[in-house]
Amino acid sequence: MSQRQRNKSIEDILRVIELCRSIRLSSADPFEVDIKEKINILRKLLPEYKFLDELLLDAEALYQLSQIVKLQDEYIKRKAGSMYIDPLLIELKLRLLSKESLANAIVKSLHPIATLDQLSPRGLERAFIYWRDLQPLSERFKDERGITTQPGKIGVEELVTMRILSKEKFEDKLKAVEDELTKVSAGEWIDYYSFIDAGKYEEKVEKAYILAFLVTEGKAEIRIDPLSEKVYLRSSNIKLTSEPRSVAIPVGAE
């Protein structure tokens, strides 16, 4: 093995180690690590090792992978213990069921609150008339609710026009939040809610509002863990090549 190939092998091992450590320290989804793929990488490199430091790095990589497997095992046990059912798993099982099996499952799980001996032709007629003449939900209690409006969005130009905020003041706040995020994050993922947490509720909302502009401009990134539903944030400097996707993140009540 040439020196260049040896350096490449060491880099591959270090990448595996660093990936496992970052997953463990950030409490991210342990299933993001493809254990089989990483093991195959180490297996391919093993016959080429000639020095002790390479073997030690290989052992460290295996240890880190074993810790990820442990996290995966704990995750499955935790979800199983809380009777967690993945919606995708349910959908898959339903698709695999035959029509007869699906019908039998529905019949077994059906527990009607009324039986045939409690109904009468007159009662069925009254029930039919009631449901037939029942107004849709959008029309019920309309007078009591009054006029409702759909949620919308407001940008900086609207705020300036309404004299709620000056453009110079907004740009100063934008720069201050960007500098703070760069210092706190340093390119690493941090908890979104911890970053926007402020002394007053109004300040928290304002900070979240300004962060939305940084994300749109590519100066910040947001990642949502689909399993834990935790929201992560980090500073960035990427050039957006497509239309940004809108994501609603609740700030919380006062």
Image (spheres, grey):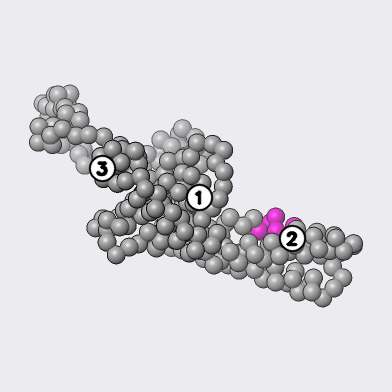
Q: Is residue 9 left or right of residue 111?
A: right
Magenta span includes 151: no
Residue at mark 1 to residue at mark 3: CA–CA distance = 27 Å
Return the residue nearer the eye: 63 or 197.
197
Q: Which residue is mark 3?
A: 163
Return the residue nearer the eye: 83 or 178.
178
Q: Residue at x 48, y 44 (%)?
A: 217
Q: Residues within 10 Å of mark 1 (few under 14, many from 20)?
A: some
Q: Nearer the viewer, mark 2 or mark 3?
A: 3
The correct choice, above or below, for 43 with respect to 150 in the image is below
Q: Quadrant of residue 70?
A: bottom right
Q: Quadrant of residue 157?
A: top left
Residue at mark 2 to residue at mark 3: CA–CA distance = 56 Å
Residue 105 in the image: state x and y as whole percent. Answer: 40, 41
Q: Main secondary structure of the magenta part?
A: helix
Magenta span includes 38: yes
